[in-house]
């Protein structure tokens, strides 16, 4: 009798997988490039506001159920908003001159660190799209110990929305937290972000 029950359960599950359960299909496809702004701080105390963030995501919605909810991608943070516009423009246009001037003044560490502080190289993230549209992403090594000078750990949790019902995510907003490595050292970061498809 146990054998008959096992065979029946196996056949039922196989039929469901082959038919494709609608409730196991992702709410939308997150694949795409998104850009927007992020803030660093808590509630009413914002240390950084309006800096640029770019998120690039990939998802295979045609994969088997549950695997089709896996999301991979990168996030790039830019801290150029912490500088006045004219100074940020000068630094990007004349970076070699600024680096030479800082080196002459004994600030060679700052000269090499400033570009790395203003735009962080892309950070790789993995995670999942949950049935309610929540997306959870984090660096693959989020639970590992930090090594000297290497402590890039970032977690992002937010809600995605398909505004025009075309099956593709249009907006994504939520919170981010972790530590990022720059040439000036490790920076803790906690804040909010809001992006839209490009």
Image (cartoon, rainbow, N blue to C red):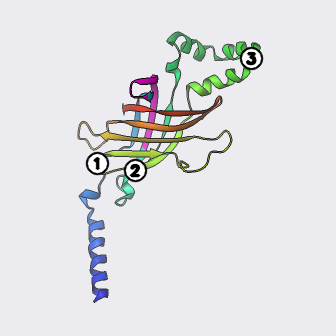
- Magenta segment boundaries in residue numbering: 42-57
> Residue 124 vs residue 135: left or right?
right
x then y, percent, for residue 45: 43, 24
The residue labelled by disc 1 is 132
The residue labelled by disc 2 is 128
Residue at position x 27%, y 71% in the image = 15
Is residue 22 highlighted in magenta? no
| Label 3 element class | helix
- Foreground residue among 107 and 23: 107
CB under 8 Å between callouts 3 and 2?
A: no
Q: Which corner quadrant holds the N terminus?
A: bottom left
Note whether 110 is above or below 142 in the view shown: above
Residue at position x 37%, y 45% in the image = 135
Q: Earlier in the sequence, mark 1 or mark 3?
A: 3
CB under 8 Å between callouts 1 and 2?
A: no
Note whether 50 is above or below 64 in the view shown: above
CA–CA distance between discs 3 and 2? 45 Å
CA–CA distance between discs 1 and 3? 52 Å
Q: Which mark is residue 103?
A: 3
């Amino acid at each position: 009798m146990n054998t008959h029950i096992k065979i029946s359960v196996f056949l039922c599950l196989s039929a469901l997988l082959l038919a494709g359960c609608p409730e196991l299909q992702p709410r939308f496809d997150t694949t795409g490039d998104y850009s927007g702004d992020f803030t660093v701080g808590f509630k009413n105390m914002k240390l950084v506001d309006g800096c640029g963030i770019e998120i690039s995501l990939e998802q295979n919605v045609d994969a088997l159920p549950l695997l089709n909810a896996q999301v991979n991608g990168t996030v790039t943070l830019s801290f150029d908003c912490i500088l006045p516009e004219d100074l940020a423009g000068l630094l990007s246009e004349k970076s070699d001159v600024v680096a030479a001037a800082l080196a002459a003044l004994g600030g060679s560490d700052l000269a090499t660190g400033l570009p790395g502080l203003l735009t962080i190289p892309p950070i790789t993230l993995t995670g999942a799209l949950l049935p309610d549209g929540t997306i959870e992403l984090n660096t693959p090594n989020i639970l590992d110990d930090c090594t000297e000078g290497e402590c890039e750990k970032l977690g992002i949790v937010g809600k995605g929305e398909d505004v025009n019902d075309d099956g593709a995510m249009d907006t994504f907003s939520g919170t981010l937290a972790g530590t990022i490595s720059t040439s000036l050292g490790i920076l803790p970061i906690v804040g909010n972000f809001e992006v839209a498809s490009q």
